[in-house]
Image (spheres, grey):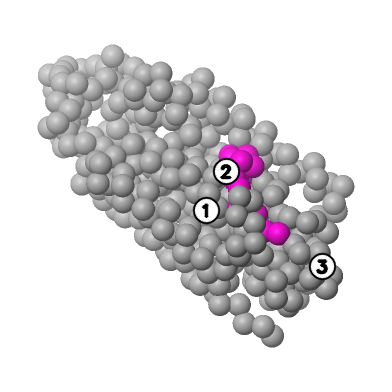
């Protein structure tokens, strides 16, 4: 069997990103999301930048749990899509990586590749674009992370809190997460192909990319290996070049090709200049981490809120966070602590260092979002 070093490297990178994000999500549950805590799973997802875009452009503010670092991640992902199509999906995205490994397990156990009938698959692909439009419209209309309860990635990021907690807060998202893993066991990257709004967004942007995988028809021996191995079921062996928004640029087709020169990576403005698959991976990482580096150097890669002392008396009630203590809330909105207790009907026995998200332990039926309204 032909060795596939680039695929090995790519999967090693996916494992790294999966472990890193999983650890950060766990740390968020342990440390909380305050200035000294760890970023939330929402802040670490580039899609949060798109969800916040209209609110940011019209008011200068970002949605709850989203910070300028998240917006920077989105911008970097867009730039990457323009230069190297959906390489973010194929080389970096942890949720895509998890699906890929479930798919590998399925092939190992079942010893068979499955595919949804082409007639049905063609229509199912449009679902992710409908999901994308729905989320953008609702997020921009409500000025909130409207998708959060239905987001499988958010559900995954909160698993360390315990299944009962995830089930209570992210019931639909958790169900979609489980179905995505089960679906990927039989059909490669099930969620990516049919439901992922970030993939849909990057796919549309990739349409303007000059990058393509070209099939040299005079060299191709029509062995069909490229089509068989494609995780998103592109019929590579039947087309002259891969320019579809479905391609995640994983380079599995180029590595599987037994005939040198039959499948090549190139830019339309530099025809004949072949790009090796390993350069695609290296370029993906350079663009992604360089973007993060520039954002960090310019002070725009913060994924955590500013210290309370820097926002004293300037916060609106809608900007309060669950990690804040009652003293923080008092200082942030410039309201006497006694008045905060009175408006929220908090017993005097509750310590002022109690975090807002923990008040339900003292007050039956306490809802933080309802409390915010009382502090306006």
Q: Which residue is mark 3?
A: 218
Query: Looking at the image, which residue is at 43% across and 53% down?
Result: 287
Can you identify the residue that label 1 sits on? 88
Q: Of 185 and 217, which appears nearest the observer? A: 217
Residue 1 relative to residue 289: left or right: right
Q: Quadrant of the C terminus?
A: top left
Q: Earlier in the sequence, mark 2 or mark 3?
A: 2
**Residue 236, image x, y percentages:** 76, 60
Residue at horizontal 21%, vertical 36%? 306
Q: Residues within 10 Å of mark 1 (few under 14, many from 20)?
A: many
Task: Report the span colored magenta.
Answer: 200-214
Q: Residue at x 23, y 22 (%)?
A: 315
Q: Quadrant of residue 227?
A: bottom right
Badge 2 crowding class, 10 Å Cα cut-off, few under 14, some 14 to 19, many 20 or more, is many
Instruction: Give the residue drawn at x 39%, y 37%.
Output: 71
Earlier residue among tags 1 and 3: 1
Residue identified by numbered label 2? 202
Residue 123 is marked as: none
Task: Out of 367 and 125, give the one closest to the viewer.
Answer: 125
Report if residue 284 lies within the magenta region.
no
Q: Is residue 201 magenta?
A: yes
What's the distance in space between the residues labelled 2 and 1, CA to CA?
A: 9 Å
């Amino acid at each position: 069997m032909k060795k596939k070093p680039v695929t090995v490297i790519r999967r090693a990178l996916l494992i790294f990103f999966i472990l890193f994000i999983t650890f950060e999500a766990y740390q968020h549950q342990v440390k909380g999301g305050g200035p000294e805590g760890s970023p939330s799973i929402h802040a670490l997802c580039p899609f949060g930048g798109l969800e916040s875009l209209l609110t940011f452009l019209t008011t200068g503010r970002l949605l709850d749990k989203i910070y300028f670092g998240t917006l920077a991640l989105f911008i970097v992902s867009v730039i990457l899509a323009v230069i190297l199509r959906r390489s973010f999906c194929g080389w970096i995205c942890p949720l895509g990586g998890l699906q890929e490994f479930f798919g590998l397990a399925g092939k190992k156990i079942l010893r068979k590749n499955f595919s949804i009938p082409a007639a049905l698959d063609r229509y199912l692909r449009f679902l992710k674009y409908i999901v994308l439009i729905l989320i953008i419209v609702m997020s921009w209309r409500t000025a909130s992370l409207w998708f959060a309860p239905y987001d499988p990635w958010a559900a995954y990021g909160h698993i360390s809190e315990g299944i009962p907690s995830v089930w209570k807060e992210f019931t639909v998202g958790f169900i979609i997460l489980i179905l995505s893993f089960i679906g990927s066991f039989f059909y490669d990257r099930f969620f990516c192909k049919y439901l992922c709004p970030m993939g849909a967004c990057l796919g549309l942007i990739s349409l303007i990319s000059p990058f393509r995988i070209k099939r040299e028809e005079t060299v191709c021996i029509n062995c069909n290996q490229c089509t068989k191995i494609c995780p998103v079921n592109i019929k590579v062996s039947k087309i002259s070049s891969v320019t579809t928004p479905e391609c995640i640029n994983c380079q599995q087709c180029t590595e599987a090709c037994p005939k040198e020169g039959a499948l090549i990576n190139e830019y339309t403005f530099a025809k004949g200049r072949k790009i090796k698959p390993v350069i695609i991976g290296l370029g993906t990482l350079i663009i992604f981490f360089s973007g993060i580096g520039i954002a960090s150097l310019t002070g725009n890669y913060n994924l955590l809120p500013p210290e309370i002392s820097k926002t004293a008396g300037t916060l609106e009630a809608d900007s309060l966070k669950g990690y804040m203590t009652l003293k923080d809330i008092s200082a942030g909105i410039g309201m006497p602590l006694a008045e905060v207790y009175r408006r929220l009907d908090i017993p005097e026995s509750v310590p002022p260092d109690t975090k807002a998200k923990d008040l339900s332990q003292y007050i039956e039926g306490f809802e933080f979002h309802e409390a915010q309204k009382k502090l306006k």
